[in-house]
Amino acid sequence: MAATELTLYELTGANPELRFSPFCWRIRLALAHKRLNANCIAWRFSDKQKIAFSGQGAVPVLVDHGQSIHDSWRIAKHLEENYPSQSLFGNASASLVQFVNAWADRALVPAIAQIVILDVFNGLHEQDKAYFRASREKMLGASLEAVVEDKPTKITKLKRVLAPLRQALGEQAYLGGNAANYADYCVFGMFMWARCVSPSELLEKEDPIYTWRERLLDAFDGMARAAFTVSENQRLKVTYP
Ligand SMILES: N[C@@H](CCC(=O)N[C@@H](CS)C(=O)NCC(=O)O)C(=O)O
């Protein structure tokens, strides 16, 4: 990995090893793709002042030689422009990858939240819990407990939302074709979010998305597979019809 002056602020839970933000995962993978090293700083929802320099209150925030960049899509573009080797977009246009980025945000975040949002809450540090519950319950219009009721039905709904991804991955190894690109990382980040905090298995073994997810778990010397999860043992036991 190249020596760089990069710092990444990443969301963490009660255990500082728990790095579960889907948006931060995209950037972790983008950095690994470009063989860049970053100094990763654990950040909690209640640490707003720690990233106040970025002019907003969400992570990921990347600081590159003193320049701060926030929002995962803007960070990806910054990395692509400033570290052009090992292109993040491969043969795809940036706008097509941006579409996948937006699809993951708009379609997958709500569908997966319906399954894992209470697990996210349970993984948080006590000092973050009241803020998280209040802000997410306002956003979702229901209590976290009510949102995750009837998980098997929610998993079936997610399966339907994933249909276009399943079709694409039924025909090629990655959204990027023969090799992963940032479109893959945008979507895979969502599965890392669930994997890190939740015992719920979102995919069936026969699903081409499962096989794709396995490949990405193994990428970069198994970086994602080695990530800390709160419920490794539980996850293996929980299955849904
Ligand atoms: N569109 C942003 C979303 C970033 C985002 O929502 N990050 C969450 C963590 S997963 C956050 O920091 N939220 C702050 C809050 O809710 O106060 C991106 O792609 O980076």
Image (tube, rainbow, N blue to C red):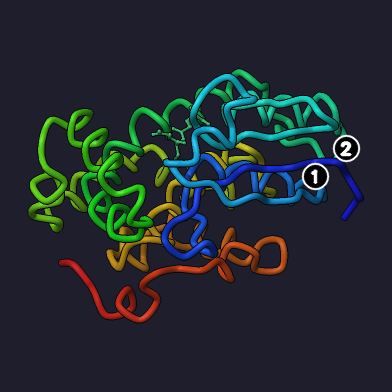
- Give the image quarter of residue 217: bottom right
- Relative side of 57 to 10, left or right: left
Instruction: Specify the quadrant that holds the N terminus.
Output: bottom right
Q: Position of residue 147 (x, y in %)?
A: 13, 44
User: Circle 2: is it few (<14), some (14-19), or many (20+) Cα within 10 Å?
Assistant: few
Spatial distance from mark 2 to mark 1, Cα to Cα?
7 Å
Q: Which residue carries the number 1 mark?
A: 34
Can residue 177 be seen in this snapshot?
no
Say what amino acid the circle numbered 2 marks.
Ser
Q: Position of residue 33 (x, y in %)?
A: 75, 48
Image vertical order of residue 132 relative to residue 139, above or below = below
- Picture residue at 35% right of the left edge, 60% below the top: 123
- Relative side of 146 to 113, left or right: left
Q: Nearer the viewer, residue 121 or 241?
A: 121
- Picture residue at 58% right of the left edge, 27% below the top: 52
- Mark 2: secondary structure: loop
The tag on residue 4 is none
Q: Which residue carries the number 2 mark?
A: 85
- Picture residue at 27% right of the left edge, 64% below the top: 200
